Amino acid sequence: MPILSARKRKALKPVSILARYCFFGNYAAAEKLFNEVSGEFNVDGNWGVGVMLAVKGMIMAGREGDKSTFYWRCINADLKELKEIRDGLAKDLSRDTISDLESGFLNAWIVIVDEFIKIVRERSSRN
């Protein structure tokens, strides 16, 4: 996976909080936070647009309840499946022909899936 600049890493920080809100079905809080931090995603042009598209898509898929989306696939995945999804995203991110938009989109989804992995681990350690 390519190394991200400090600006890009900083831009991705709110994504994990947004993912946590969505995982637990708090889409109103996710939308509110998204509106508050969306300016932070304005990093390196199309890269930031990719991050915004990933986050907006996650929130919309959750709010609309469309079970056929990638978001719902991730929400309903177990730990093994989430790790496989993450590995697939990382592999796709390492392509030589990746655009800045795709890079931002995939980086955001990796952060989202990483947060879902943390949540699933937290839940399993309580049981």
Image (cartoon, rainbow, N blue to C red):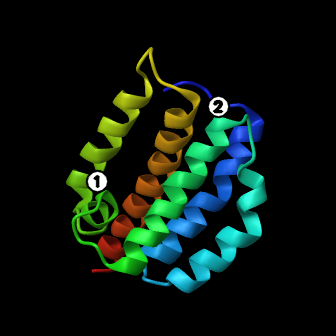
- SS at circle 1: helix
Whether residue 54 sits left or right of residue 119 in the image: it is right
Percent position (x, y) of residue 98? 47, 23
Residue at 45% of width from left, 46% of height from top?
Answer: 110
Position of the C terminus by quadrant? bottom left
Q: Nearer the viewer, residue 91 or 96?
A: 96
Q: Which mark is residue 82?
A: 1
- Badge 1: how crowded within 10 Å, few (<14), some, or many (20+)? many
Res. 77 image quadrant: bottom left
**Residue displayed at 71% across by 49% down:** 11
Distance from the alpha carbon under mark 2 to that under mark 1? 22 Å
> What amino acid is found at the position of numbered circle 2 in the picture?
Leu
Of pointers 2 and 1, the one earlier in the residue sequence: 2
- In the rendered view, tell whether residue 23 sits above or below residue 10: below
Expressed as whole percent of the image width and height from the top left, the position of residue 119 reads 41, 69
The residue singled out by tag 2 in the image is 4
